[in-house]
Amino acid sequence: MKSAISFEGEVKERSPGVSTVERILLKIRDGIRNGAYAPGQRMVEADFTAELGVSRGPVREAFRRLAAEGLLTEEHHRGMRVRQITLDELKKIYRVREMLEGLAARMAAENVAQGGSAKQLQQIAKQLERAMEDGDMQVYFDLNASLHEEIIRLGQAPILERIMPQLNTHVFRMQFWHLLKTEHAKQSNEGHRAIVHAIVEGDPDEAERQMRAHVRASGERMLADTSGMLLRS
């Protein structure tokens, strides 16, 4: 089974409050997100049980949940595969992301205006700048995801914390290759600076405006790059 991530032993570790199924879900989502599992790739239960050191039950449950999230698809007599999204789906995901992430940025700025701390957000933004200066696009990609996740967390809306990871997994899977291009990463980080500044200043209107513009522009750039690789319908 193709994999760019070493799972050996990791899922066996017992983290308080995290079930075996949840650990498997995280590992597979990360694998889909960073391209370790390609669209259309078959997901074989036996491979996962051997690699992760778990029984078939948790793997089956993880597959079932990922199928419900739209990340896997079950083919008759052929088992589970990583689902290939269409160009139309990706366009609609970006429209929804623009609205929801704009709302998350607004709520984060509102929280800061009421005394919430943006220190973690500022720290991630500084790390993004260093990654950009170093030309380390792999690190930049990981920090890009962390920045968006921190904005959602800072907005203190649990429903967004549940929804956005599912919505973003498809997008981040494609952004991995898109953001390896330095010029795209530079444009992306210009948007991050404006978003972080507005949130730190406690300006909800500007935070939402900048986030929506950032997501829209990122989507337009990525769709221009990847439309030829996606199914039309």
Image: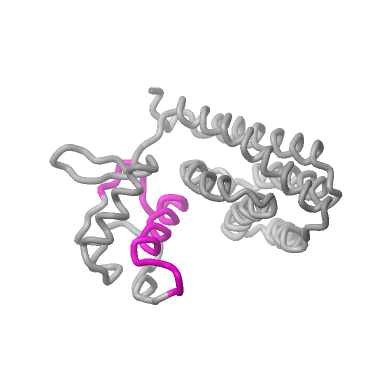
**Whether residue 55 is situated above or below residue 206 in the rendered picture:** below
Q: Residue at x 39, y 73 (%)?
A: 10
Find the residue positioned furthest to the left. 77
Residue 129: x percent and y percent? 74, 57
Which residues lie in the magenta part? 15-42
Assign the C terminus to one quadrant of the image. Answer: top left
Which of the 4 quarters of the picture holds residue 77? top left
* Residue at 82% from the left image edge and 52% from the top image edge: 114
Q: Name the residue rendered at 77%, 63% in the picture.
A: 119
Residue situated in front as seen by the camera: 91 or 180: 91
Going by the image, does 90 lie left or right of 42? right
* Picture coordinates of residue 25, whole percent (x, y): 38, 57
Q: Does residue 36 show up magenta in the picture?
A: yes
Residue 158 vertical placement versus 88 (above, below)? below
Q: Nearer the viewer, residue 194 or 223?
A: 194
Which residue is most to the right? 201
Q: Compared to 164, does 6 lie above or below?
A: below
Left of 189 or right of it: where is 18?
left
In the rendered image, residue 83, in percent from the top left (x then y), is placed at 34, 40
Where is residue 188? Give x, y as percent: 68, 44
In the picture, the quarter occupied by the N terminus is bottom left
Q: Say how the picture is coloured.
A: one colour
Residue 179 is a magenta residue: no
Above-or-below relation of 142 to 9? above
